[in-house]
Image (cartoon, rainbow, N blue to C red):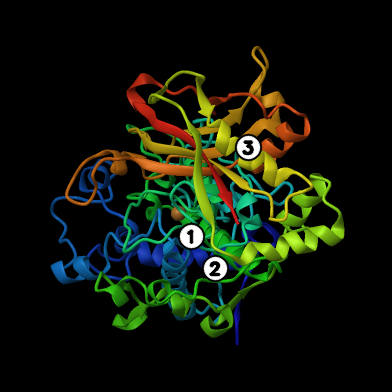
Amino acid sequence: MANMRKNVWELGGDWADPILWYARGVKAMKARPLAEPTSWRFYGGIHGFYRPWWKQLGYLNSTEPMPSNSDVATYWKQCQHGSWYFLPWHRGYLLAFEAIIRDEVVKLGGPADWALPYWNYFKPNQNPLPPAFASEDWPDGEGDNPLYVVARYGPDGDGKVYVPMDQVDLNALGDPDFIGAGSGGSQGFGGVDTGFSHGGDVHGGVETQPHDNVHGLVGGGDQTTLGLMSWPDLAGLDPIFYLHHSNIDRLWEVWRKIPASKGDPTDAKWVGGPAGIGERAFAMPMPGGESLAYTPGDMSDLSKLGYGYDDVSPPSATPQLVARLRRLGVPETESVVRRTAMAGPKTVELLGANTESVRMTGTEARTSVALDAEVKNKVTESLTLESTTPPDRIFLNLENVRGLNDATVFSVYINVPDGDDPASHPELKAGSIALFGVSKATAADDKHSGNGLTFVLEITHIVDTLHLAGTFDASQLHVRLVPRRPVPDAANVSVGRISIFRQAA
Ligand SMILES: [Cu+2]
């Protein structure tokens, strides 16, 4: 029988049974010593671990035994980011975590089909943090609610936690490809081809949005206050993490059900995972001392995994490409021909780049991207009615983004008229990004070269708009970076290069 994961806001009350049982399970995990593989902090360490911060926040003290070296080597610091393994790795992480909570729930006399709820911040009025997580008390008024954490500062830094709807989107669902073309083109719904990637470089589509942003907006804070959700090495310690990831996991299933989606990768390297290419295997502690070893291929089919979601309906019925061809005025019969031309290999080509690194401080940063006339002609040609191929997709890359504060969130706008407030031009917004994992990716160590992170935003809709308005002839595009909150100098945020690529089907 499948366990059904349900919407946390629609369980029938702030402390409906599934939430109350979750809190009891979390309390039981928190009561276990760190070295025990089914303990709360051990599970946090599976996602990521950084000793000084764990100490600073009281999750580690010097007298307590650490987990064994072999447990650390097998399980800790495993989370996959900037990788096509992002979705399947986190699915296994949630499955094992859910099994441990359920085991505890059953021991305490609760339901054997308990399932992890999800937080769908996109539904109207469901963007505030679910109230059970925001209260210091249990529903009977007693203190020490295990779902509450102090280090959760929210988007305004005042502890009021919600997801501002203008900072998140579901654009990734419109990408038909799971695997990104890479090299400046699409980052795909699921990410680009990598090996074992604890950290990573190019963030995938659904990883960038809404995943990263919800982390930074919920966690908030900066590198001294350390909101748990903002940092990969702390995020697994916040009980809301698992409801956020349950929603991301649900979006994977939503995407699979969209007719235009081409489905999960069939490449042996994805299916077999890092273990199949001689790298570290994915493994999770399970109840009763068992261990779950899994590959991405094992994670594809929910029906084989024994759980489901109560709602996997797509947000919009019109596939992106169809909507786009309509917008460009391509007649329906011809549109079918152009859609079928999509199956072939993709060409990714640089359309232009700015010339120097942009430092992001204060309330805004600006730069310009000069466009190559010849490449731009190819784009324009693909947008005309005479073209026989699908219109090019255009991607803006923020390369080598470096910084010290992972909670930094900013939006990117193209060609906002001088003197206008970017917020009044949603049609010119490329997207919003959050720098989840940036500080680690900025520090050079044995695993990272310190090159920072790369984010890819599809700006196809903006280029279409400019084209239709006859203003895509310009020799350059003007880019504005607008942080949600002013960025202090101390955060040391910079973007190495802003580049724009065309991707032809
Ligand atoms: Cu996450």
Whether residue 344 appears in this view of the structure is: yes
At label 3, the amino acid type is: Asn
How far across and down, in percent of the image, does residue 68 sit?
Answer: 15, 68
Single out the mark in the foreground, 2 or 3.
3
At label 1, the amino acid type is: Tyr
Whether residue 135 appears in this view of the structure is: no
How far across and down, in percent of the image, does residue 444 sit?
Answer: 21, 41
At label 2, the amino acid type is: Leu
Does dot 3 land on a helix, a strand or a loop? helix
User: In this rendering, would 157 be left or right of 282?
Assistant: right
How far across and down, in percent of the image, does residue 96 sit?
Answer: 41, 73
* The image quarter in which residue 264 lies: bottom right
- Give the answer, above or below, for where 405 lies relative to 338: above
Marks 3/1: CA–CA distance:
47 Å
Q: Which residue is mark 1?
A: 242
Q: Residue at x 25, y 64 (%)?
A: 33
Point out the residue furthest to the top here: 419
Mark sitting earlier along the chain (2/3) = 2
- Give the answer, above or below, for where 25 lies relative to 233: below
Q: Residue at x 41, y 62 (%)?
A: 27
Q: Which residue is mark 3?
A: 377
Pointer 3 and pointer 1: residues touching (CB < 8 Å)?
no
Instruction: Assign the N terminus to one quadrant of the image.
Output: bottom right
Does dot 2 land on a helix, a strand or a loop? loop
Identify which residue, 181 or 53, lies in the foreground. Answer: 181
Mark sitting earlier along the chain (1/2) = 2
Marks 1/2: CA–CA distance:
8 Å
Does dot 1 land on a helix, a strand or a loop? helix
Q: Which residue is mark 2?
A: 116
